[in-house]
Image (spheres, grey):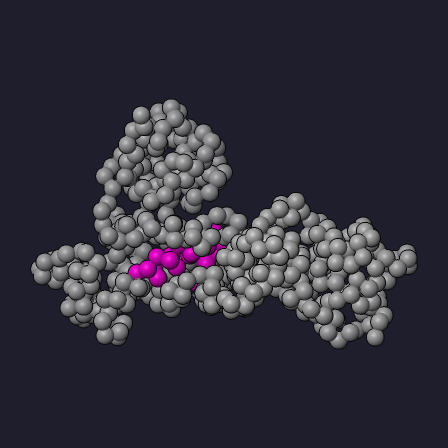
Amino acid sequence: MAKEVPTAIKIQGCASKYNLINGSYERLPSDHNGKAAFVTKVATPCYIFHTGKARWVISKRIDDGQRCYAFRKDEPAADDPTGCQGPWVTCGEKDEWTPDTAITCSKVPGSNDQFVKLRLSLEEEMKKYGLIDTASLKQLWKRLDFNGNNVVSLAEVDKMVVEMCAGGAWPDWLNNKPALMRAFQKAKAGVDGGRDDFVEKCEFHDLLLNIFWFNKLWKIYDDIDIDDDRRVDFGEFKKGMDKLGLQLSEEEAKKTFGSIDTNSGGEVLFVEFCAYVRKRVNPDDNPAFDADIVSGESAGKTLRKKHGDTLTQSHFVQKKNMKQFDDVEAEFKKMIADNDQDKMTKMWQHLDFNGNGKVSLAEIDKFVVENYPILNHKPALMRAYKKTDEDGDKDDFVEKKEFKALIGNLFYFNKLFWLFDESAGEKANDRRMDFNEFKVCLVTAGVKMAEARAQQEFKKIDTNGGGKVLFDEFCGWFAKKECPAASFITPDQK
């Protein structure tokens, strides 16, 4: 008979560079891989979960456990890591994984605080909108990090939130500026508590978590703020706490309000309310984390320390990024819209170098490698070629009359394969998406479309009415939608 799973676990004794794993972990509402999962209550959390194989791990987010701060073998097999006997293993100063017998793992009582329960609900909320798994995070980051320099500004984050909410991929309540500002301030602090003007890729999960957290707090604060002046006086605070089920006596309420109202102005601002909740959720957290509320510390320290003063310049090693795709897209669209015969003829002649009026997959591959390396992704290229042939005369070649369709498919299949990380042709061909995933894909790819119109378009692709469309079908539809002029017309046809 399985033992009762604890409501909280405490990790102590880690003195290595990963001592951030020390702390109390509250049990999450849902399991992972069939076993309980736990999370710390800090703004930059750690998670304890089972990999589904043979280990319990402590990591910065719930995934497959390949990258973690520490792990413990599930021996003997237990419902939680406190039931295992072996030591926790961590990566030491020399980057070698070694057992650390000083680390203890024990059961402790969980918290019944309303704000703690609210914090523990966030992972479920984020999972609903596809913001937990690694693939979804990669997709969003590629869309957000337009120029590929691995940092994003507040303006870029705000634009993403507005577009995701407007496109129906996220709920409208996530689009609140005060909450977004607070989320960005906290995420940009990073694990080391520094300050800079950007959020880095490694902080992206924390940013999304904070966007949900501070928007939840904003909903509470806005409800408490009865007169909507973005300030809460004592009367509003007392009524608000009562509504939340946090019954405080008059004396307790005054004492609590006074501790929040640090300047004794008789009013509590949203940032002060957030600091109050943080202390309730995790009273042992670093108090300097809220220093920006009072001091307005200078920005730019951490990233300038890491990257120098030319942070946003192009000295980073550049991988594919959205700007590069946008540049090629503009070039192709202009060529087709202007019916630029000279350029299209030169392109076709380069493709059809033997002059037989048709090109093979190998010839298309050679053309892409030599002229548009950003489109040199073999699975996407193969699918674009196959789609063009299927929509044409199905003769295993692309002919002149199919040239424009080929150009459109080459570009959009590559862009979507890159954006959604479809690394294998078979995987892309088998992947199916429902309507909600379809909406998220649209917004991530930069398409603005009303809900009713999106439903119409989805039904056009979903010809059998099964409620699912293939990713490959989505790519073909997307290419025609974004560049309808890319039809079956030869480059020398007026």
Q: Main secondary structure of the magenta part?
A: helix
Q: In which quadrant of the rendered view does residue 19 lie?
A: top left
How many numbered discs, if any? 0
Image: 414 above or below 267: above
Q: Residue sitting at 17 percent across and 64 percent down?
A: 239
Q: Is residue 320 visible?
A: no
Front in this rendered view, residue 259 or 121: 121
The reply to whether the magenta stretch includes residue 204 is yes
Q: Among all residues in the image, which is located at the extreme right? A: 355
Hey, which residue is sitting farthest front in the picture?
464
Q: Is residue 63 magenta?
A: no
Position of the N terminus by quadrant: top left
Q: Nearer the viewer, residue 126 or 158?
A: 126
Say which quarter of the image contains residue 355. Answer: bottom right
User: Going by the image, does 61 lie left or right of 392?
Assistant: left
Indicate the quadrant containing the C terminus: top left, top right, bottom left or bottom right. bottom right
Whole-percent x, y for residue 193 in the image:
37, 53
Relative height, residue 378 to residue 346 (above, below): above
- Left or right: 426, with 197 as reference point: right
Residue 45: give x, y in percent of width and height. Answer: 37, 47
Q: Nearer the viewer, residue 120 or 280?
A: 120
Region of the chain picked out in magenta, as a range: 197-217
x then y, percent, for residue 304: 47, 59
x and y percent of residue 319 in the render?
62, 55
Q: Is residue 402 left or right of residue 420?
A: right
Q: Residue placed at 73% from the left, 50% from the top?
A: 382
Q: Is residue 197 visible?
A: yes
What residue is drawn where x is 40% and y is 65%?
A: 172
From the viewer's side, name the closer residue of 274 and 462. Answer: 462
Name the residue rendered at 41%, 40% in the picture.
32
